[in-house]
Amino acid sequence: MIAWGDTLRSGGRKPELAERLTKIPAYLFAELDAMKNEKIKEGVDVIDFGVGDPDLPTPKPIVEVMKRAVEKVENQKYPSYEGMESFREAASRFYKRRKGVKISPDDIIALIGSKEGIAHLPLAYVDRGSVVLCPDPGYPVYPSCTVLAGGKPYFMMLKKENGFLPDIDAIPEDIAKKAKIMFLNYPNNPTAAVASKEFIKQAVDFCIDNGIVLAHDAAYSEITFGVKAESFLSYGYENVIEFNSLSKTYNMTGWRIGYAAGDPDVVKALLKVKTNIDSGVFQAIQEAGAFAMDECDEWIDRNIAVYENRAERLVSGLKEIGLNAKKPKATFYVWCEIPENYTSMEFARTLLNKAGIVVTPGIGFGEGGEGFVRFALTRDTKTIDRAIERLKDAGICF
Ligand SMILES: *Cc1c(COP(=O)(O)O)cnc(C)c1O
């Protein structure tokens, strides 16, 4: 018998990491994660508002379609790169019905979750030194995929006084010249803001004038409370690509299914990158996804009602302890301003130590997130009530 420990070499020369990887900032939540795990070990019943992953299950009928689709031999083969025609047609119908936008199924491609498409887009447009406009605070994937492609993020600040919309007029001319992509995300994670029509028009015009791809991340497009989140594609098709996802809409984060739609040149460029990296989305998942988009509108309404109820409970509780919390217009997040004498990290640490409650410090979404923490509404109302009780019992009041 071979004793592996004796035969395997070790202690040799280590390969050096690529510069691009070392430039991606360290995981900011590592410290908080460690503290959370420590509390759990101590036996504290930690209430976690940090997770942006729905707690509710995928609607049963979608799971049933999936079960049948797995059995089909044709679904066990390599899928097409662009996605099944039936899936792309369902996405087209979904846009028509829910957003009032006509999109040809030819201008839609399936994605292995929208994150996959977002992360691969810069490979199609970014050269060394190219600039990508990224919102701050924002989804950390935008700057990191920019860096992986050799580009430089330029951060557009989302300020409360501007309704968490970036000031497009403030983008310097030389930056606009070097910019290849502008990432935007409305309804917005983490600020829960919704974009106005005027803003969308301004962003579309700016990108067309400057030869920039406007990449709109619409992951929360359906989770809105009494307002409509408009598709950016209803204001411009040229240069615009919109990413959509079934993850948040139908509680399907684990399934990995989304799609991109818009300017055929941009969609084709992304597809060319993807053709060289992945081999499409498992067809059974596409079948289930097409069914979801065609048949599950009432499940979206149920989801909205659940999140709205939770948002109201949490916000009124946070107000009772003296925080300036506002009910979100959309998404399943409460973006809560914190008192001035705390950093967002200190504030998160205090809630964890004194009340066993986990929130995400705003700084984790970029410097522009300082002064806020994010509560994810992925816990039921009982748990929310319990969290508020605990904050009161711990004497936390601002
Ligand atoms: C959850 C989320 C996504 C990713 O969704 P997937 O389709 O599951 O990859 C994209 N953007 C934002 C802002 C998100 O919060």
Image (cartoon, rainbow, N blue to C red):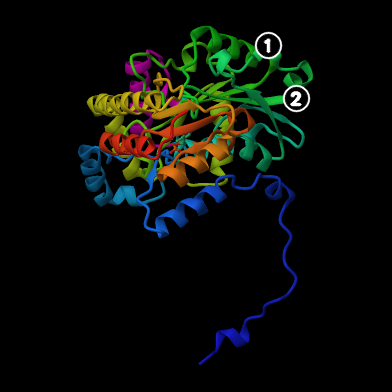
Q: Which one is in front, 6 or 343?
A: 343
Residue that mark 2 sits on: 178
Q: Is residue 318 left or right of residue 346?
A: left
Q: Is residue 385 visible?
A: yes
| Three-letter amino acid code at the position of disc 2 | Lys
* Residue nearest the viewer, comparing 374 with 389: 389
Residue linked to disc 1: 169
Q: Does the beta carbon at disc 2 come under 8 Å from ligand 1?
A: no
Vertical side of 68 occupied by 391: above or below: above
Q: Residues within 10 Å of mark 1 (few under 14, many from 20)?
A: few
* Residue lying at the far bottom of the rendered structure: 1
Magenta region: which residues? 83-106
| Residue 61 highlighted magenta (yes or no) | no
Q: Can residue 280 be seen here? A: no
- Nearest the viewer among 166 and 71 is 166
Q: Is residue 253 left or right of residue 7?
A: left
Residue 249: give x, y in percent of width and height: 34, 30
Residue kind at label 1, given as amino acid type: Asp
